[in-house]
Image: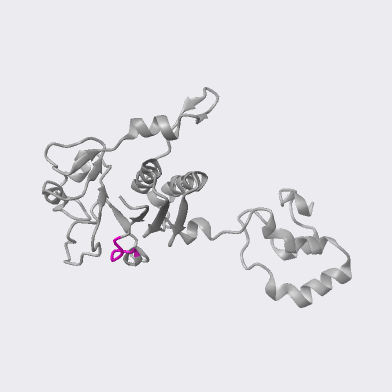
Amino acid sequence: MNNKVAIVGTHSKTRSLAPYDDPSVDIWVLNESATDAPDGERWVKRCDAVFQMHDPMVFESLHNLSDPKHYEWLRQPHEFPIWMQEANPDIPASVKYPREEMKEELFCNFYQGLKQKDREVYDSSMDFAIALAVHLGYKEIQIYGVEVEADTEYLRQREGIKFWHGYALGRGITVRTYCGDAMFDRPVYGYEVQFARILKNTEPERRNYTSKSWSKRPKWRLPGTHTIGQLRTGTYQSGFPACLN
C-alpha cells in the first residue's frame, strides 16, 4: 500500500489522466472498468483494486450493458482485491467490504433526525471507494473520471461524493480532484451578489458601476434570484438575498 491512491471513475473526460505509470500511486477502479471492453478498447492500464458493490443479480447478469462478460471476468483469479458486499466463493479475488467496522469508526458520532438514528452515507461506488481510502489511512486521494452532471441517478450521487470529499479533508487528507466541475466550480454563497450592493447606493454610483464595471459582472445567476433590471426598478421580491433588502 502506497501513501497515495487514485480512484478512477468511468467518465471519459479525465479517466485516462490517472497516473497509471506512477508506481507510487495505487489505482482503484469501479465496476466493469477493469474488464476488457466489448469493443476491444481497455482504458485501465493497471489497477490495484476493483469495487463491485452491487447485488449479485446485477453483476451476474448476462445482459450487463457495460460488459456481458463481466461475471465471467470476475470468476477468474486476479492479483488484486475485488471489494464486494460479501466474499463470494465463485469469485476468488472477492473481499468483503468492512462496512460494519467502518461504521463504528467513521459514523460513531453521527445521528440524524428527530429520532436521532445513526446514519451512513453511501450513494455510489465512488463513495465506498473514498470511504475505504479514509479508513485505510491514505495520505492523499486523487479522483478522476467523475462528473455526475447528467440529470439521472448520477445527480443523486453527487451529494454523497461531496460528503466524502469533506470527510477526507476533515481527516487532514490531501484531496486532488481532477474532475467534477459541476460539483465544485460554483460561486461562494453570499459573495456571489456583492456586485449588486452598489445598485442600492446613490444614482451616480450606480451609473459609474454600470458604465465601468458591467462587463466584469458575474455571468451566472442562481436559480430564484433576479435580473439586474429587477434590481434597478425595485421589482425584485423579498426572497432576494438579505444583503440587498
Report which quarter residue 37 is drawn in: bottom left
Q: Is residue 178 above or below residue 50?
A: below
**Of the pair 195 and 239, the residue shown nearer to us:** 195
At horizontal 83% and vertical 73% (from top left) the residue drawn is: 207
Q: Position of residue 52 (x, y in %)?
A: 25, 45
- State the residue lying farthest toward the top: 115
Viewer can see residue 158: yes
At horizontal 72% and vertical 73% (from top left) the residue drawn is: 214
Whether residue 20 appears in magenta in the rendering, the answer is yes
Whether residue 28 appears in magenta in the rendering, the answer is no
Q: Position of residue 109 (x, y in %)?
A: 50, 29
Q: Position of residue 78 (x, y in %)?
A: 15, 50
Magenta stretch, main secondary structure, is loop
At horizontal 69% and vertical 57% (from top left) the residue drawn is: 191
Viewer can see residue 226: no
Colour treatment of the image: one colour
At horizontal 74% and vertical 74% (from top left) the residue drawn is: 213
Q: Position of residue 156 (x, y in %)?
A: 43, 47
Horizontally, residue 130 falls left or right of residue 217, namely left
Q: Is residue 180 above or below residue 213?
A: above
- Segment tinted magenta in the rendering: 18-23
Number of numbered callouts drawn: 0
